[in-house]
């Protein structure tokens, strides 16, 4: 598997959680602004952090375990995708738990009902 390992793990994460959108109707994609508010700050902070770590030579990525495609600053495409895919999968899982258990997750039930 070698160079596809990292990418395969990300695809696996999506394959496991994507059906939650349809099966449980969690509506994560339908509420895309809310998803962006959840993911974008994390994405920016961690990409900047990784770019800094790469520049300082604290961090390195194996060309054998990644595709070898790098963005400016040396960050592999898989690492950028990681900062999008894992939060997306987390939000899908959280919304699935909310849906199944009725947990309000810290925001009012009436708001949750309006968004369904």
Image (cartoon, rainbow, N blue to C red):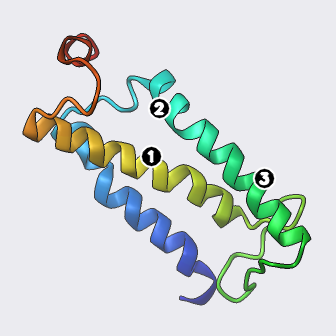
Helix or strand or loop: what does disc 1 sit on? helix
* Horizontal relation, residue 30 to residue 41: left or right: left
Residue 18, percent across and down? 33, 49
Task: Decide: is 50 above or below 100.
Answer: below
Q: Residues within 10 Å of mark 2 (few under 14, many from 20)?
A: some
Residue 20, percent across and down? 24, 45
Q: Residue at left 46%, top 72%?
A: 9
Q: CA distance from mark 2 to mark 3?
A: 20 Å
Of the two numbered discs 2 and 3 in the rendering, the one whose residue sits closer to the viewer: 3
Mark sitting earlier along the chain (1/2): 2
Residue 53, percent across and down? 81, 69
Q: Which residue is mark 1?
A: 88
Q: Residue at left 47%, top 56%?
A: 86
Q: Residues within 10 Å of mark 3 (few under 14, many from 20)?
A: few
Q: Quick one: 35 or 25, which is closer to the camera?
A: 35
- Look at the image and tell me whether residue 70 can be seen: no
Helix or strand or loop: what does disc 2 sit on? helix
Helix or strand or loop: what does disc 3 sit on? helix
Q: Which residue is mark 2?
A: 35
Q: Residue at left 26%, top 38%?
A: 95
Q: Which mark is residue 41?
A: none
Mark sitting earlier along the chain (3/1): 3
Q: Residue at left 30%, top 60%?
A: 16
Snapshot quadrant of residue 96: top left
Q: CA distance from mark 3 to mark 1?
A: 19 Å
Snapshot quadrant of residue 30: top left
Of the two numbered discs 3 and 1 in the rendering, the one whose residue sits closer to the viewer: 3
Q: Are marks 1 and 2 in contact (CB under 8 Å)?
A: yes
- Look at the image and tell me whether residue 109 can be seen: yes
* Horizontal relation, residue 93 to residue 37: left or right: left
Q: Which residue is mark 3?
A: 48
């Amino acid at each position: 598997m070698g160079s596809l390992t990292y990418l395969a793990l990300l695809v696996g994460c999506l394959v496991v959680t994507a059906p939650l959108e349809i099966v449980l109707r969690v509506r994560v994609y339908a509420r895309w602004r809310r998803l962006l508010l959840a993911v974008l700050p994390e994405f920016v902070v961690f990409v900047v952090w990784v770019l800094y770590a790469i520049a300082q030579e604290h961090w390195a990525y194996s060309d054998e375990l990644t595709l070898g495609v790098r963005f400016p600053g040396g960050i592999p495409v898989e690492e950028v995708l990681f900062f999008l895919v894992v939060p997306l999968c987390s939000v899908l899982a959280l919304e699935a738990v909310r849906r199944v258990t009725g947990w309000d997750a810290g925001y009012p039930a009436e708001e949750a009902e309006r968004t369904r």
